[in-house]
Image (cartoon, rainbow, N blue to C red):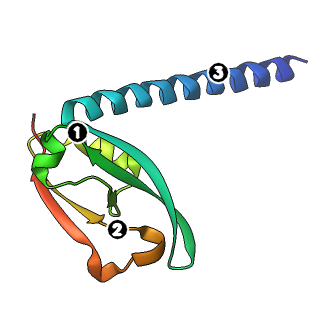
Amino acid sequence: MGAIVATLVLVFGVWLVTKNAASLQQEIYVKLEKKFSFTSSMVSAQIENQRKEFLKIDPIDNGLIFEAGFRNGDIIISHTKPAFYALLYKKKGKTETIEIFRGNLDSSFNRNSLKKITFEIPN
């Protein structure tokens, strides 16, 4: 009986920590989007015989992301959503290169049409 209670407490603890971590992560995402002036969404596409999820960026008001070279609908190919936001959060003052695709992933994706945006992440 004690082992069952301990297991339930452990499962509840993991659930609570996971829920709090997801909430904190979302708060950081919102703050970064505001600071860098962009919104994002996830898009999926069939690429090289696999269904994949990608982060789509939409700059707002010619802000930092727009100045870096991103345009509405740019799809980040080189980083997952958590990796891209972590880069913005942790790499202040560093120059980074992001590989993007401009266009419709399902109909026109071609590795030769990828573009690279290199920019310094402001403090």
Q: Which residue is mark 1?
A: 60
Residue 65 image offset from top left, x and y in percent: 18, 45
Mark 3 or mark 2: which is in front? Answer: 2
> Pointer 3: residues within 10 angstroms few (<14), some, or many (20+)?
few
Hey, what amino acid is under mark 1?
Ile
- Whether residue 97 appears in this view of the structure is yes
Horizontal relation, residue 95 to residue 9: left or right: left
Relative vertical location of residue 51 with respect to residue 43 in this rendering, above or below: below
Hey, what amino acid is under mark 3?
Gly
Relative vertical location of residue 106 with respect to residue 111 in this rendering, above or below: above
Horizontal relation, residue 8 to residue 120: left or right: right
**How many numbered discs, if any?**
3
Q: Which residue is mark 2?
A: 103
Q: Which quarter of the figure has residue 105?
A: bottom left
**Quick check: marks 3 and 1 in contact, CB under 8 Å?**
no
Mark 3 or mark 1: which is in front? Answer: 1
Residue 63 image offset from top left, x and y in percent: 14, 39
Q: Which residue is mark 3?
A: 13
Image quadrant where one finds the N terminus: top right
- Whether residue 120 appears in this view of the structure is no
Hey, what amino acid is under mark 2?
Gly
